[in-house]
Every structure is written in C-alpha cells, then in structure tokens.
Image: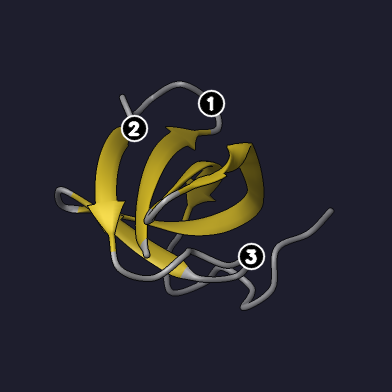
Amino acid sequence: MIYKVSYVVLGGKHPGAIRNQNEAPKVGDRVRLGRAHFQVVEVSELIPPREDFQFLHVTLRPWSKNSPDTPST
C-alpha cells in the first residue's frame, strides 16, 4: 500500500508537505520535514483506499526535546 500523505502544521509557520510513504503515520509519531521536527496529533482518511493507494491528511505540531511523548488533546 502506498500512502499519499498531506502534512499540515499547526500555527501556519511551516508550509507542510505532501509525501508518498510505505507506512501510514500514527498519532504520536515524529516526522521530519526539511530541518524541522514535528509530532503527529491527528490522522484523517481523505477518501476510502483505492487499489494500492490511501489518501491521508495529517496534522502536526512542532516537536522539540522538551515536548511530551504523547500529544495533548
């Protein structure tokens, strides 16, 4: 399965990204976009999977060494 993932960063200070991935991101995962690190706070399916593709929308928040391991809701 190929996951087409749209990453959106909370706060609008980073443009986000669209990536093809072999694994689906999960809440709590850490993601690197360029030089910046983020934590996944939400994963939503955009449309049902088709053939070998699944389209996902992922919301990120900035991550640092002082960030908690689990996102706050």
Instruction: List the single residue furthest toward the bottom.
Output: 69
> 30 or 52, which is in the foreground?
52
From mark 2 to mark 1, how far is it between C-alphas? 11 Å
**Residue at coordinates 42% horizontally, 39% vertically from top-left?**
7
x, y percent for residue 73: 84, 53
Where is residue 15, by image quadrant?
top left
x, y percent for residue 60: 52, 46
User: Dot 2: what SS?
Assistant: loop
Q: Are the residues at dot 2 and dot 3 in contact (C-beta closer than 8 Å)?
A: no
Depicted 73 relative to depicted 67: above or below: above
> 29 or 48, which is in the foreground?
48
User: Dot 1: what SS?
Assistant: loop
Q: Residues within 10 Å of mark 3 (few under 14, many from 20)?
A: some
Q: Residues within 10 Å of mark 1 (few under 14, many from 20)?
A: few
**Position of the N terminus by quadrant:** bottom left
Q: Which residue is mark 2?
A: 16
Depicted 69 relative to depicted 46: above or below: below
Q: Earlier in the sequence, mark 2 or mark 1?
A: 1
Badge number at residue 11: 1
Badge number at residue 27: 3
Q: Nearer the viewer, mark 2 or mark 1?
A: 2
Depicted 65 relative to depicted 25: above or below: below
User: Dot 3: what SS?
Assistant: loop
x, y percent for residue 31: 36, 61
Kindly identify the amino acid type of the residue bearing the numbered disc 1: Gly
> Looking at the image, how many numbered discs can be counted on the residues?
3
Kindly identify the amino acid type of the residue bearing the numbered disc 3: Val
Q: Earlier in the sequence, mark 1 or mark 3?
A: 1
